Every structure is written in C-alpha cells, then in structure tokens.
Image (tube, rainbow, N blue to C red):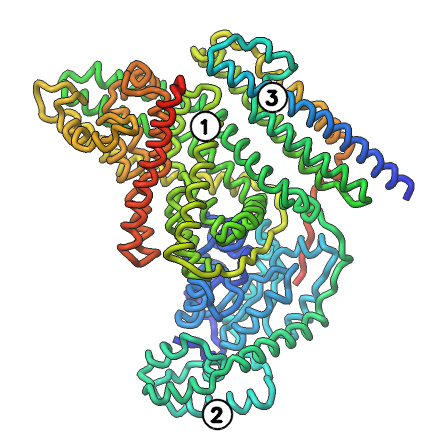
Amino acid sequence: MAYKTKNVKEIPNGGKISTNIALAGNPNTGKSTLFNALTGLKQKIGNWSGVTVEKKEGKRSFNNFELSITDLPGTYSLSASSLDEQIARDFIIYDTPEIVVQIVDASNLERNLYLTMMLRELGARVVIALNMMDLLEKDGSSINVQKLSTEIGIPIVPMIANKKIGIDDLENAIESVYLEDQKPMEIKYSKEIEEVLSTIQKMLLSIPSIPSSFNLRWLAIQILQNKSDITTLLESWNVKSKVIGELTSFGKEDYEAEIIDSKYEYISKVTSKVWKKGETKVTRSDLIDKVVTHKWLGIPIFLLVMWGSFQFVFAVSVPFMELIDMLFGWLSGLLVDNIRIEWLGSLLGDGIVGGLGAVLIFVPPIFTMFFILSILEDSGYLARAAFVMDKLMVKLGLHGHSFIPMLLGFGCNVPAIMSTRSLKNNKDRMITILINPFMSCGARMPVFILFAGLFFGASAGTVIFALYVLGIVVAVLTAILLRKTFFKGESAPFIMELPPYHSPKLRSATIAMWDKGKMYLKKAGTIILIGVVFVWFLAAMPFGGVEYGGPDTWLAAVGTFFEPIFRPLGFDWRIVVALIVGFVAKELVVGSLGTIVGGGESDEGIKSAILADEGFYALNSLSLMVFTLLYFPCAAVVGVIKKETGSWRWTIFAIVYSTVIAWLFAFAVFQIGSLMGSGL
Amino acid sequence: MEKSKNTSNNMKTSLLAGSLIFLVAAIAEIILGAFKMYADSKELEEHWVNIIPFPPGIFPGLVVLLIGLIWIVGYFVTRKGQNANGHLSVGTIIALGFIFLFILILLIDIFNAYALGLEDYDGWTILASLRWIIFLSPIPMFFTMKYREFIFTRKKKTIMLQS
C-alpha cells in the first residue's frame, strides 16, 4: 500500500528473487523502447508523447532476478492531470513497485528531475536510466553522471535505449538498489511550511487506521498542496470526516506554488553543478522544422505527404493482391469442382473461401498503409503534423492534441479512442472520442480499393485520398458543432514537445506494421469467418429451389426491408445487407458482397461480377464509399466508446449521428451526381 | 569565410533556378491536367494536352508546385542572409521521395504487365511510366550531389558510455 524504509536484503542462497519494477518517466523519453529492450516484447513505440496510455507488463531474468516489469504512461509529475498520468501515478503510489526505474531524457535534465524529486519524496526506490545520451553528446552538452548520482543519492545509468546500450549497467543498478537501502528524500521547505508539515504529520500519526508503512511526510505535503483526491484516500482509511476537514483546511494554493518553487530551486542548484551546456547551435531538426511547420507550407506539405503515402500503398499492393487473388481463385475452383455435395461445395467455395478471399486480398494494402504510417511516426514527422494542424484546429475552436488520436484513427479507431486519455480537459476528450470514427480506419480500405479501383481507374489513389480528407473535414465540422452545443468552453492549452527527427528504423516499422496488421488477420480467422458463413447461410436459405443470393432468399428479405431507406443513395438490397453486416466488422462489407454478388471465389471474380451487374456503377459506388467512410462504427469501436465515455447516451449518439451524417453525404453525392448527369 | 559566402551564393542561385523551373512546369502541368480531366469527362480527343514532356495531371502538378514553393521560400530566406538548408533539404527530400515512388511504380508496372500479364496493361509502354521520372529527377539529383552535406547528415558514431 505504501513505501516504507526497507531493510537491506540478501539474495537467497541459490534461489531466485522475484520482484517487480515500474518504468516511469516524462512522455517521449523512451520508456517503451527500454521496456521492449528489457522484455523482448514488441510494444508500440512512437516518436511522440502519449503513445502509452495503459500500463503494460513484461518479464526479464538476469543473474538471480526475475523481474516483472510494468511500463507506465508518461507523466511529468505525480499530480496527475490527465487519465494516463493518473494511471501512472496510482500505480506508483498504491501498487508500490519494489523499484521505480525512471527514464530521464538526458537532453532535458532539469524538467525530468522534477518527477525524480517527487518519486524520492514519496519514498520510492529509484534508479535513473539517463537515456538519449547520444543526443546530449550531439548537442555538445555533458552531464557529470557520478556527481549527479551523489547529489540526489540514487544510482544513475547512462543509456541509449534504442541501441540497447547500458542495459547491463541498468541490471546491476537494479540489483544494488534492491539489496541496499534508499531513504526517502526530504527537501527542506520554508520554515512556515515545515512547521505546518510537522503539525499535519503529528495529526496523521494519531490516526491509527493509516498504515504505519505510509510515508507521512509525503501525505502531509499532499494535504498542504490541497490535492483533490487526498480526501478519497483518507476516506479509504475510514478517517472521520471531521478529522479530514481539519486536515484539508491546511491546504492552500499558495503553499503548492511555494512547494513547487522549492523543488525547482533545488533541481536548478543540482543541475548547475553537473550539467554543462553545449554551444547553442541551430540543429538540422530546427532547420527542417522551419519548413515543415511553416505557417503556409506546413499544411500543404502534410497533405502532400499523405497523398504520396496513399499512392505508395496503392502501387505497392496491387501485384500482391493479384497473387493472393490467383491463389484463392484456384482454391475455390478446386473445392467447387471436386466436392460432389452441392451445398457443401457452395459453402466452402462461395461462402468460406469466397468470403475470406474477398477480405484477405486486402491484407497487402492494409499492411503497406500501416508500414507507411509507422515510418512517418517513427521519423518524428507525425508529431509535426499534429503541431501544424493545431494552428488550424485552434482557429476552429478545437484542441491541437485531438489531432493525434485522429491520426491514429487511420490505423484503427479502437487504440485511437483509447489514446484520448492523454487529453487533460474532459470536454476536449469527449469531442475527440466522438469524432474519431470519422477517421477512416484500415478496415474500410477494402471497400475503397475495390470500388475506386473498379470505377475510377488511374484516379483510384486520388479518390481514396479525397475520402480520407472528407473524413477529416466531417470530423472537424462535427467537433465545431459539439464545441458550440454540448461541450461549450475553452480548450486546455496545447503543449507538445517536438521530438528530434530520427531515421525511421525498418525493424520497428515492420513490428508496428505487423502488430496492427495482425489484428486484421485475426479478425479474418474469427469474426469475419463466422460473418461470411452467416451471410452465406442467409443467402442460401431457404434450402431448395432458390437461387443462391437471389431475391427469394432470407438475406434478400432483410435487405429489401431496409432498401427503401437507402434507395435515394443508389443502393439496392445487396449493398444494404453488406452495410448492415459491416457493423460486426467493416471488412465484412466486401466479404459479404463477395458472397452475395456471386463470383465471390476471387477478387477478379467479384470485380467481374460487379462490373457485369447493373446494380453497380461509378456514381453509386462513390456514394457507397462515402457512406462506408462515415456510417456507424463497428462493434469494437462502439464498445470502446462506451468504455471511454462511460455513457450509453453518448455511445448511441455516436452511432445515430454518424449514420445520419453518412446518409446525408451519400445522398448529396448520389443526387447531385445524378442531377449533373455526371457521366459516372 | 569566403568559401561560406560562395556556397551561400551558389545555393541562392540553385534555389532560384530550381524553383522557377518547377513552378513553371507545375503551372503547365496543372492547367493541362485540368484540360485533360475535362476532355476525359466529355470523351474528347485530348492528345493536344500532351504537349509537355510529362503526363499532365492536377495532383502531380501540385506536388511539383509545392516543391517549387518550398525552394522559392528558401531563396527569399537566403536573400535575408538566413540559413535555407532546411528549405533545400525538405524540397529535395520530397522530390527524391516521389522519384522513389515513381521508380517503384515503374517496377510494379513492369511486373504487372510482363510477369502477371494483366489486361489493364495492354498497350502500356515503359516510356509512359519513365516520363515522370525523367522530368522530375535532374534538379533534385543535382541538388543532392552538390549539397549532399546539407541534405544528408553523416552516419553518427556510436559513443561508449561509462557510468
């Protein structure tokens, strides 16, 4: 429950020591990189802050130690102001890891040491991993590590985590801290504060329900700083409300400012002794930033980069798609021709292989897109994109940080919505959650690729790019609407550290691509497989005498029931069914069409079937793509919206609102296109 | 000192010349691209829009325009006596990125046309995909060779750490 002074420990003779450590630190200091280096796991790494929003667990063995390692979200202090910071803070305070390894960005020593002071004041046993020493050297600066260690009384290990330099030294430091004692740090405050602290500590000492192991000085400081959650903590120990009232009456904002000042004064004194600043020079990152964050060039460059990325995705994936298509076509033909029981041949050939083939064909573009996004993220460019968009978003009354979850939404809306935890203002967070489903996730890509490729030929990449831009535009307009209605008020200020540019690492981009892409493959083997079999079943029922996927099937009955609503968008019952099934997973839209339209045994088959079908043409395909982009999110996203908003009301709002918007936009596309005699 | 001044002057000239060529080409590309789009939608003969040595198109034109704009801003930055290495680098890196993309597309086109024998490639020639690369390459390549040290940093040495 709390930190206490520990006795010196010994390693059991020949035995193993199992212990737990936490990786803590400011955002974007390389916690996840170190976590991966220590555990051999492949947790997502991003060259921007706020990548880790939940704690992650891993293990490492060395010498006699078996470490359980917890990677915590980045936090600047233990006074949590956002949900992810709160997760980190609560873990350190209440789960009391044996040792906290604080990852410190060597090039930002002063700011990082503030968290160190808080950890040491709490009584946590700390090892500092002084990361990014290469950047410090490049800057021409230097740190006297030995002196710093002596000054603050904890071991410090210089590291370059992304090159795995310093890992052995870190292990040794963890071992020595485990075996030796480390007393809490006591920063001396003004005489007045010390007197009040002493009074509060005496009062706390007289409360028997407070665990004796709890660091009372730290608790007293929290009370004095008027921390909002201190009452909850005291209540959890059954402290009487009268006593709580007396204790909290000591809290004043003036004290908080003075306490913070004292800590920074101490840090400043320490750093002046150990840190030698290099010659101030304009870095390469600075020069590039002058261009990519330029007020006029920044946004066009971002749009150009995204357009180039989609061209790349489309170009690279075509031959792989053709090869997969050939494979599934061959397999399907083999099944249908060689299975004598007609319905079984149809189930395996048309249903399972056809439906799955229609989904798996899109593995290459989805993986390529994740690869490109990872490269951009790893290079540090996406952080600049967020910065550039912030200027625009602030003008629109939005919050700049919202753009990061929006960008993540291009991959999958589920982690993107979870990443909103790093937003400090709840109104900003709610808006960002509700607009996120408009960001086109990878699962919608198959619909775009199929129909843009079929009906828009050489302009397919441009059409897909335009759809992504439309998603952003709708998201921004929705955010403005929400800000002016349900979530009135000022945004929290946007503070974002621009990380230095890195050469993207092929390995980490490949890992990130695989991590995100495997979700798609997993879905193909589970939920999509069940979905396509279900669609096949409805398309074949009732057995005997009906044409598979024809107008007399159960599937047609469902589709025709809803068809009148969608007729103004140019959709017939088959498209309606595919869209409804898409609620389970968006990939099923194409999978279902493959099953329903026939020719579902291969991509080429679906393409031929669609081209030969009068129910599909360029204009209603465009309308379908727009509807797919904007309509209700899939079940997994609905689940995460409920979890993160904690409200069924807002979850239902997200479903209904997006579907209405999708209908209106698709209606506009189809009707205006028809009126203009677009020639599509 | 003298050498630095010469380099700065050279860069100024390079940025101005490069940007002007790209800007003029971009405007031609966009205007003819718009005509081509119109001609395509009306199913008109559009051969006359192919008067420029690269395929006309609005989006590729915007790429060239933006690179030209980055360099021209860089030119004005150097005129103020400031460092325009960033402008030169970003414009050149974007151009190189697109050259890489077009080479990749060319290779994929060759694969699709000759290895997979896709119907879409009937009548396609290597020259059709090469035109863009030929047009886009010379200036960024020249910049890359002449200002290599500004555009690409040397490989970092690994430092040894001692606790």
Q: Determine whether, in the image, residue A90 is placed left or right of residue A605.
A: right
Quadrant that contains the C terminus of chain A = top left
Label 1: chain? A
Label 2: chain? A
Q: Nearer the viewer, residue A320 or B84?
A: B84
Q: Amino acid at mark 1?
A: Val
Q: Secondary structure at mark 3?
A: helix
- Please give the name of the residue rendered at 50% of the width and 63% of the height, measured from the top-left corner: A75
Establish if B93 lies above or below A4: above
- Residue tagged by mark 2? A199
User: Can residue A122 be seen in this snapshot?
Assistant: yes
- Classify 10 Å Cα crowding around label 3: few (below 14), some (14-19), many (20 and above): some
Q: Amino acid at mark 3?
A: Ile
Closer to the eye: label 1 or 3 = 3
Q: Secondary structure at mark 2?
A: helix
- Residue tagged by mark 1? A463
Label 3: chain? B
- Classify 10 Å Cα crowding around label 1: few (below 14), some (14-19), many (20 and above): many
- Please give the name of the residue rendered at 42% of the width and 41% of the height, measured from the top-left corner: A474
- Please give the name of the residue rendered at 67% of the width and 20% of the height, measured from the top-left corner: B135
Alpha carbons under labels 1 and 2: distance apart: 69 Å
| Quarter location, residue A439 | top left
Residue B31's label in the rendered image is 3
Earlier sequence position, callout 1 versus callout 2? 2
Alpha carbons under labels 1 and 3: distance apart: 20 Å
